[in-house]
Image (cartoon, rainbow, N blue to C red):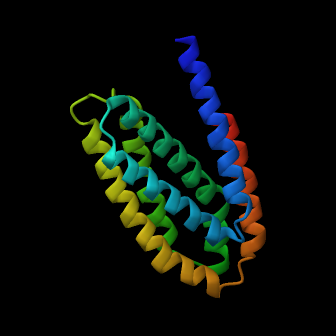
Amino acid sequence: MASKAATNGKSRNKASASDKSRTTRVGDALALMRSDHKQVSDLFSQFDKARSSARKKTLAQQICLELTVHAQIEEEIFYPAFRQATRDKSLVPEATVEHQTMKDLIAQIESAAPDAELFDARVTVLGEYVKHHVKEEQNEIFPKARKSSLPLKALGEQMLERKHALLASLR
């Protein structure tokens, strides 16, 4: 068991270093969010192809971690700035409700064994829900953000810093 924990620690450290190098190159808030969206989409694809319960559990944990952190930086930093710059009254509230639904599914996934009857179904539904959320965000929120007075570069830097802090505290 101790060697498994040590192995997990090593792979987490590698993932963390990889995350930092990947996201350090991100130019602004929207590019960071788009990069996160791609990473989570890739994780869902890997989950769909996984065969062993252990691999599925590892991927599900990574998906849940990434989505938890992503939602938090959006809710703490991006959404308030977007709302203020655009005077939005519908997109942010809708996205916030979608985040809550995702958080509920994440809690169910995190508390389930990978061989539980509904484990795969919950991860699949979460993936479909995230895909819908990402499409709306990228097609509706991103264009309005680009046209607004949002300081996207500064927001991106703030979001990246918060992301690294959250990942470090949760791993």
From this viewpoint, which residue is outermost toward the top?
Answer: 1
From this viewpoint, which residue is outermost toward the bottom?
Answer: 147
Indicate the quadrant containing the C terminus: top left, top right, bottom left or bottom right.
top right
Query: x, y (%) of residue 78?
Result: 64, 65
Query: x, y (%) of residue 161?
Result: 76, 53
Nearer to us in this view, 27 or 29:
27
Q: Quadrant of residue 15?
A: top right
Query: x, y (%) of residue 43?
Result: 44, 50
Q: Residue at x 73, y 64 (%)?
A: 25
Q: Residue at x 37, y 37 (%)?
A: 56
Nearer to us in this view, 149 or 45:
45
Q: Quadrant of residue 32?
A: bottom right
Query: x, y (%) of residue 34?
Result: 56, 67
Q: How many marks?
A: 0
170 left or right, relative to 59: right
109 left or right, relative to 12: left
**From the viewer's perspective, is residue 131 above or below residue 85?**
above
**From the viewer's perspective, is residue 146 above or below residue 79?**
below
Nearer to us in this view, 154 or 40:
40
Residue 59 appears in the rendering: yes
**From the viewer's perspective, is residue 6 above or below residue 166?**
above
Q: Residue at x 44, y 40 (%)?
A: 59
**From the viewer's perspective, is residue 51 above or below residue 127?**
above
